[in-house]
Image (cartoon, helix red, strand yellow):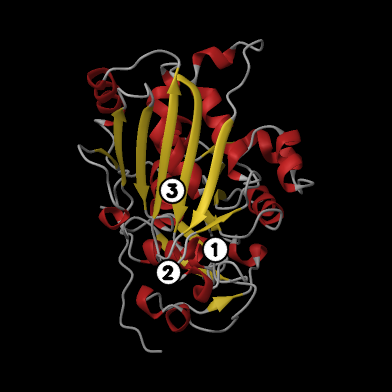
């Protein structure tokens, strides 16, 4: 396919490779980096479709680079015409990502990893949910990449563990309550479009099953549960006490007949009564200065954030039950994955956080 897109970047821009660019997340990351004025996308790699143009595989993204096999030695040699890579976005599945992340770090490349391999700080928790970790020695180096909560640590990180899409929506929805120690119990009812299943469909995520249907999946066993629990525990002052019982999150995911979009509906039993005025004040205070989080006055829809890096949040106090209801809408491929990776790269390399995303 012929493509007339031109990459425009400043002299001396950090050079980036996207490993795993044939999947939905990697392809979108490549698109965002190709058009980004402050990064130079030098290569897109894949374990399939080698030699095919990414603009042929994903015409709408207009990235005129051919997919190549990942050769870290070549890409990290500054004398090579395509070398001197400063950063990488690794878009591999869990367990497959960690060895590549390790090899990149050994050559001084800073990495944003889109897998689950470095999102959990406790090795035992990872092994319980995912199995044996390929590079446990790197866990201590990784910073959790929810930009709004860990911006300072991300700025100097060598490995940024990009959050899962469900934890992104859920933790942003609940962070102001967790900080105030206001969550006694929470149920998260989350819904996502079929793009969250990636390019490989199975019998439950195939379009013929997803159309005109809603499917709960991974019932009582979703791997994003410990990720949400760990992040909320870090925010809750009471959880700093080892004797305090950690919050257990009831999380349930649903597949809905959308392409892109995600809604986390959170039903919170607070530790004390919370009036509407206090609730509103806490959310405004938490996010008023955040460029990509919008506290809104009515429940958001996923169409409002489609193909953007925004998260829209609405919180309400239910006087009848005493519960707090919080709704959080994101695009699962953008803020839930690829554009958040670029947001993190901006922070890592000292660029305006909104650059290439606004």
Which residue position holds label 2? 212
The disc label shown at residue 215, or none: none
Corner quadrant of residue 200: bottom right
Q: Secondary structure at mark 2?
A: loop
290 relative to 234 in the view: left or right: left
Q: Residues within 10 Å of mark 3 (few under 14, many from 20)?
A: many
> Could you give the CA–CA distance between mark 2 and mark 3, rounded to whole angstroms?
38 Å
CB-based contact (under 8 Å), mark 2 and mark 1? no
- Work out whether 351 lies above or below 175: below
Looking at the image, which residue is at 30% across and 32% down? 315
Label located before the other in sequence (2 or 1): 1
| Residue 161 can be seen in this image | no
- Work out whether 357 lies above or below 267: below
Camera-nearest residue between 197 and 327: 327
Label located before the other in sequence (3 or 1): 1
Which residue position holds label 3? 345
Kindly report which numbered mark, 3 or 1, lies closer to the viewer in this rendering. 1
Corner quadrant of residue 292: top left
In the image, farthest residue toward the right: 132
Kindly report which numbered mark, 2 or 3, lies closer to the viewer in this rendering. 2
Q: Residues within 10 Å of mark 2 (few under 14, many from 20)?
A: few
Corner quadrant of residue 19: bottom right
Say which quadrant the N terminus sits in: bottom left
> Could you give the CA–CA distance between mark 3 and mark 1, rounded to whole angstroms?
25 Å
In the image, farthest residue toward the left: 297
Q: Residue 167, position in %: x, y?
A: 50, 42
Label located before the other in sequence (2 or 3): 2
The disc label shown at residue 197, or none: 1
In the image, farthest residue toward the front: 320
């Amino acid at each position: 396919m012929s493509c007339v897109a031109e990459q425009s970047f400043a002299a001396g821009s950090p050079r980036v490779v996207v490993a795993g660019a044939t999947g939905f997340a990697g392809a979108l990351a490549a698109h965002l980096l190709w058009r980004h004025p402050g990064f130079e996308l030098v290569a897109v790699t894949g374990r399939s479709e080698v030699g095919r143009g990414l603009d042929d595989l994903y015409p709408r993204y207009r990235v005129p680079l051919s997919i190549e096999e990942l050769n870290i030695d070549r890409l990290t040699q500054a004398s090579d015409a395509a070398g001197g890579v400063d950063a990488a976005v690794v878009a591999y599945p869990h367990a497959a990502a960690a060895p590549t992340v390790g090899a990149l770090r050994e050559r001084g490349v800073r990495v944003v990893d889109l897998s689950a391999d470095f999102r959990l700080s406790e090795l035992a928790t990872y092994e319980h949910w995912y199995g044996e970790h390929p590079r446990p020695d790197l866990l201590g180096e990784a910073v959790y990449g929810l930009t709004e909560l860990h911006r300072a640590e991300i700025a100097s990180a060598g490995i940024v563990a990009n959050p899962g899409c469900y934890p992104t929506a859920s933790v942003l929805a609940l962070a102001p309550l967790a900080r105030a120690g206001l969550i006694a119990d929470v149920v998260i009812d989350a819904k996502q479009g079929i793009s969250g299943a990636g390019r490989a469909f199975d019998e439950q995520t195939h379009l013929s099953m997803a159309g005109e249907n809603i499917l709960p999946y991974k019932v009582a066993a979703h791997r994003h549960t410990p990720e949400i629990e760990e992040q909320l525990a870090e925010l809750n002052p009471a959880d700093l006490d080892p004797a305090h019982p950690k919050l257990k999150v009831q999380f349930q995911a649903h597949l809905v007949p959308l392409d892109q979009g995600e809604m986390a509906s959170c039903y919170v039993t607070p530790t004390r009564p919370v009036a509407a005025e206090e609730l509103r004040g806490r959310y405004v205070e938490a996010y008023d200065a955040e460029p990509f989080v919008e506290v809104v006055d009515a429940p958001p829809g996923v169409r409002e954030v489609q193909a953007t890096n925004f998260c829209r949040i609405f919180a309400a106090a239910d006087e009848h039950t005493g519960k707090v209801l919080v709704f959080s809408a994101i695009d699962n491929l953008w803020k839930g994955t690829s554009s958040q990776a670029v947001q993190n790269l901006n922070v890592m390399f000292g660029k305006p956080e909104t650059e290439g995303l606004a």
